[in-house]
Amino acid sequence: MNTGVADSQSTAVADDQTTAVEDNKTTAVATNKTTAVVFAYHNVGVRCLRVLLDQGMRIPLVLTHVDSPTETIWYDSVAAVCAEHGIETLSVDDPNHPDVVSRVRALSPDFFFAFYYRKMLGAELLAIPTRGALNMHGSLLPKYRGRVPINWAVLHGETETGVSLHYMDVKPDAGNLVAQTSVPILGDDTAHEVFQKVVVAAEMTLVRALPQLIAGTAASVPLDLKAGSYFSGRKPEDGRIDWSLSAHDVYNLIRAVAPPYPGAFTKIGGEHVIVARARTLAGTQAQKLAPGSVVCDKTRASIVCGDGQAIEPLALVVNGASLNREATSVWLSARQAV
């Protein structure tokens, strides 16, 4: 049996097929004259913008945001990617201003793509692209339409979320659905950890859908908005812990707003404390203690919730100083209920 020859031939065929696929992609990218104006920010904006560039999309302008000095900037920069590729950027308070609309209209783009852009696009702007305006939303639409969908999903104890590529309408997150990709939410995932999965899912979704969009063969289906939900934005004050809630609800709040988000906070011994990470304690019963009471034993410190169950903080931020699990236990032990 001449397996050496057979293996060599198989390898040669595989190499030829790989080369053919790569050549076809290179040819498609080289001949792609499709143009898009992009509205993008955050890590999803960075990765999806890179997908468009990788597929040869011609991008004359990207609208993005100036980083806020009051916000913790833990994500990558769309503006930096644009500078790397020589793409013009524009940061405006109102993308629907007549001057902006006129400037974008003059570019005659085939598509708009919006990736975690924080401003709503009005009807006049959305009417400009000849082949449609699409948005990448961080949920499995029609669930969690609106703002900060990942945080809301974790807060509500969901076990799954994902991304949805859909056509834009004046009504937010309401246009026809083109593609979706789901990701799991584990029981101890923070919103930040889920967001990292969503970034990958967004890139995968766009890679899968973009060739059909460019070819004009992408199918889409209407969203059943009655089967979904809409949520507004969240403020740092919304992270205040209500210890009268169940341990499950308190735990989900901690996961939903854990750093780098502003964090779930409370007052203990008169000091402002962020509970950065925690876990629920199965089977704990402390009905005789008031919600918010700190209780300690030889192995852990915990805080009582409204259902008599407790959570164990694993990391605290006290007056700006981060405490690990051991330091957290020591700090809480000095403030336990008498």
Image (spheres, helix red, strand yellow):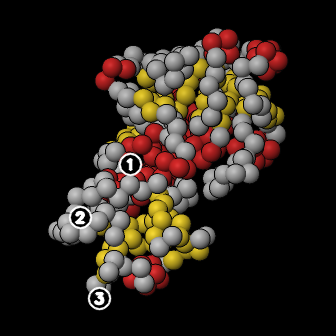
Q: Position of residue 122 (x, y in %)?
A: 64, 17
* 283 or 134: nearer the viewer: 283
User: Can you tell which of label 1 and label 2 is closer to the viewer?
Assistant: 2
The mark nearer the N terminus, 1 or 2, is 1
Please tell me whether mark 3 sits on a helix, a strand or a loop: loop
Badge 2 is on which residue? 309
Tag 3: residue type? Lys
Query: How far, Cα to Cα, is label 3 from label 2?
Result: 18 Å
In terms of image quadrants, where is residue 66?
top right
Tell me the number on the disc at residue 298.
Answer: 3
Q: Position of residue 167 (x, y in %)?
A: 51, 20
Task: Categorize mark 3 by other alpha carbons within 10 Å: few (<14), some (14-19), many (20+).
Answer: few
The mark nearer the N terminus, 1 or 3, is 1
**Mark 3 vs 2: CB contact within 8 A:** no
In terms of image quadrants, where is residue 143?
top left
Please tell me whether mark 1 sits on a helix, a strand or a loop: helix
Q: Position of residue 59 (x, y in %)?
A: 73, 29
In terms of image quadrants, where is residue 37?
top right
Please tell me whether mark 2 sits on a helix, a strand or a loop: loop
Tell me the number on the disc at residue 154.
Answer: 1
**Mark 1 vs 3: CB contact within 8 A:** no
Q: Is residue 41 left or right of residue 256?
A: right
**Residue beneath the point at 34% across and 70% down:** 293
* 75 or 216: nearer the viewer: 75
User: Can you tell which of label 1 and label 3 is closer to the viewer?
Assistant: 3
- Quarter in which the C terminus is drawn: bottom left
Q: Is residue 170 left or right of residue 278?
A: right
Tag 1: residue type? Val
Report if residue 186 is visible in the image.
no
- Quarter in which the N terminus is drawn: bottom left
